[in-house]
Image (cartoon, rainbow, N blue to C red):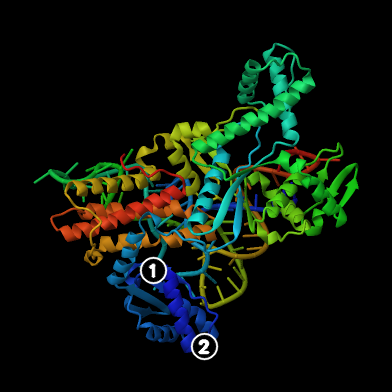
RNA sequence: GCCCCUGUAGCUCAGUGGAUAGAGCACCGGUUUCCUAAACCGGGUGCCGCAAGUUCAAUUCUUGCCAGGGGCACCA
């Protein structure tokens, strides 16, 4: 917010002196204290346009700016303009933050746009695995941040309960049933092999009499029931992970409502499909794809793309203005064809944004754990939560940028308590709670007049600066679609706090100063709590 | 063969056109009669994978190459 204010006044000054209206001056935090609090290199950019010495331009701008009472002074070094802010500026700002309390940095209605974020959407054929946890943490945090900053976003889970995998799940379960009954069996190669299949079938054998059914009806039955069972299991895991979806959409419903037929008809009317070898192909190459994609197989069954296209049609019919899909790395090749068919259906492809996150490797004792869903040796999200806790898991998943290949070291995470950043941040919060309790026991309360101008120590100003960054950080997270900036910020903020704490006492004999400092750490506490909540991590008062 | 991601300190990673490239961990030393020592303070490391190009300015953008990971269906 400070940056944009400075940028605004720069823009004004530039307009005045040089009659240039379309410059967007970038203001950055100074890399070094000797260069002030903020600085801009706009003079370098203007040098080219104005064909003049950046030094001269910088000092001209400086002269036009000096009326601003927020600045202690403005210095020109080379072509850089460095801003030194008065402490009074920070006092005013922290007072505002203080009055906002736990609503700090929260905005109302910056946009009327309805945003739909689809994420996780794992097949209901087994438990949640680790990589789903990454998608869940990423999507949920992103939605929370969007809404905190005044956007209108909801999260949705798409349940693939209408396609081939339901059939395969049924087959696999039926073969498992036969195995458990001591009959000859053969689990299909591309079927599901995990021990969770056995658990499920055993449960079903207790619940109902499967022996009276023939293979086909038993297979169908187990497939249908299995999808329900595993979906419920997944939703439960996500809930334990702090992720709750605003909406769930069933592929089955999409099919039943005739949306798939609508897609076929629309594409046929536009002459965008053709038959080849008994299958129906969509001309995705017309939209930049590498090759045309089958939407109906020669056996008459739909490929994944067709109902998914219908699902996206459904999203648009529900009057969303902007769609974001968060997919795993194995779906990157799918982006082109999905966007292609989305466009073919008459929608603006710029309204559909697809984000890809990278894989998660589990590492233990320095060795990667090889997992194979097919072979059934998987580690589930539940296992991870049991192992390292929800808070650590969520913090870690979000801490890395989505494009990084995340190595999740289980052993380290388990024994982590001493070097785990999530504890570092939570500890700062708990520590402040403790200070509040102490202050209360000394009869100091916060609801009286606070004189923030008493805060002039270097550590105090640094702490205020750090607090004031939150709105910018959240907007960065949104702009870059990268919640990762938030945990990083919280670590920095906590570090500033711990450093302040070790140098200065909050509660002293000086009541006025004690109150000002108490109010300051209250702001830190609120900021940490807000930040942690936005990534789904608890902010404990005691540790 | 084609496509995607990554390559920065011993390790894990920030840094999405600007000043001397930064944190944490690990390692060594110091700090507690005092609000939580899960903390703080001090100590040092870099052909920013390589090579060209664009630019006043490149770790950042472009291209090529090298290395690691992932993906290339009438699977989902």
Q: Which residue is mark 2?
A: A19
Can I make out residue A19 in this image?
yes
Q: Is residue A73 left or right of residue A28?
A: left
Q: Which of the image's four quarters has the N terminus of chain A?
A: bottom left
Q: Is residue A274 left or right of residue A217?
A: right
Q: Which residue is mark 1?
A: A30
x and y percentages locating residue A47 in the rendered image? 50, 83
Are there few (<14), some (14-19), or many (20+) residues within 10 Å of tag 2? Answer: few
Q: Residue at x 55, y 31 (%)?
A: A379
| A38 vs A336: above or below | below
Q: Residue at x 25, y 45 (%)?
A: A434
x and y percentages locating residue A372 in the rendered image? 63, 32
As rendered, which of A99 and A34 lies closer to the eye?
A99
Kindly identify which numbered label has been placed on residue A402.
Answer: none
Chain where mark 1 sits: A
Total labels drawn: 2
As rendered, which of A260 and B24 lies closer to the eye?
A260
Quadrant position of residue A360: top right
For label 2, the SS is: loop
Q: Residue at x 55, y 56 (%)?
A: A152
Chain where mark 2 sits: A
1 or 2: tag closer to the N-terminus = 2
Q: Is residue B33 left or right of residue A56?
A: left
As rendered, which of A258 and A206 lies closer to the eye?
A258
| A232 vs A473: above or below | above
x and y percentages locating residue A474 in the rendered image? 47, 58
Q: Residue at x 79, y 45 (%)?
A: A258
């Amino acid at each position: 917010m400070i940056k944009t204010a400075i940028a605004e006044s720069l823009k004004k000054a530039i307009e005045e002196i040089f009659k240039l209206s379309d410059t967007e001056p970038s203001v950055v935090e100074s890399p070094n204290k000797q260069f002030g609090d903020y600085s801009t290199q706009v003079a370098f950019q203007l040098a080219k346009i104005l064909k003049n010495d950046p030094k001269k331009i910088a000092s001209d701008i400086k002269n036009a700016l000096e009326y601003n009472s927020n600045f202690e002074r403005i210095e020109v070094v080379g072509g850089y303009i460095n801003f030194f802010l008065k402490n009074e500026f920070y006092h005013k700002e922290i007072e505002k933050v203080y009055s906002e309390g736990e609503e700090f940095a929260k905005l109302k209605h910056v946009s009327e746009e309805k945003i739909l974020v689809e994420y996780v959407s794992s097949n209901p054929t087994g438990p949640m695995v680790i990589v789903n946890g990454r998608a869940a943490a990423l999507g949920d945090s992103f939605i929370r941040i969007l809404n905190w900053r005044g956007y209108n976003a909801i999260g949705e889970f798409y349940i693939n309960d209408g396609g081939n995998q339901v059939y395969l799940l049924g087959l696999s379960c039926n073969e498992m049933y036969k195995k458990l009954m001591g009959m000859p069996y053969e689990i299909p190669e591309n079927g599901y092999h995990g021990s969770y299949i056995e658990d499920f079938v055993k449960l079903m054998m207790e619940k109902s009499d499967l022996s009276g059914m023939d293979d086909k009806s038993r297979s169908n039955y187990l497939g249908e029931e299995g999808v329900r069972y595993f979906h419920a299991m997944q939703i439960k895991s996500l809930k334990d992970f702090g992720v709750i979806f605003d909406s769930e959409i069933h592929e089955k419903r999409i099919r039943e409502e005739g949306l798939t037929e609508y897609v076929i008809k629309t594409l046929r009317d536009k002459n965008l499909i053709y038959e080849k070898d008994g299958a129906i192909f969509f001309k995705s190459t017309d939209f930049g794809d590498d090759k045309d994609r089958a939407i109906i197989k020669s056996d008459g069954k739909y490929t994944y793309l067709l109902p998914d296209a219908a699902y996206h049609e459904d999203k648009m019919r529900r009057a969303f203005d902007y769609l974001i899909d968060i997919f795993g790395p194995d779906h990157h090749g799918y982006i082109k064809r999905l966007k292609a068919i989305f466009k073919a259906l008459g929608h603006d492809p710029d309204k559909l944004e697809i984000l890809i996150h990278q894989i998660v490797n589990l590492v233990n004792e320095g060795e990667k754990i090889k997992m194979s869903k097919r072979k059934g040796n998987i580690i589930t999200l539940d296992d991870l939560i049991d192992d390292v806790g929800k808070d650590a898991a969520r913090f870690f998943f979000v801490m890395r940028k989505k494009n990084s290949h995340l190595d999740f070291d289980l052993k380290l995470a388990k024994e982590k308590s001493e070097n785990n950043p999530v504890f570092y941040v939570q500890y700062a919060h708990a520590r402040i709670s403790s200070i509040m309790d102490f202050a209360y026991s000394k009869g100091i309360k916060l609801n009286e007049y606070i004189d923030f101008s008493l805060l002039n120590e270097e550590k105090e100003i640094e702490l205020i600066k750090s607090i004031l960054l939150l709105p910018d950080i959240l907007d960065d997270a949104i702009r870059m679609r990268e919640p990762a900036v938030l945990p990083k910020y919280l670590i920095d903020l906590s570090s500033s706090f711990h450093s302040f704490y070790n140098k200065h006492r909050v509660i002293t004999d000086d009541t006025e100063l004690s109150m000002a400092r108490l109010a300051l750490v209250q702001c830190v506490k609120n900021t940490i709590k807000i930040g942690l909540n936005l990534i789904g991590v608890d902010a404990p008062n005691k540790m």
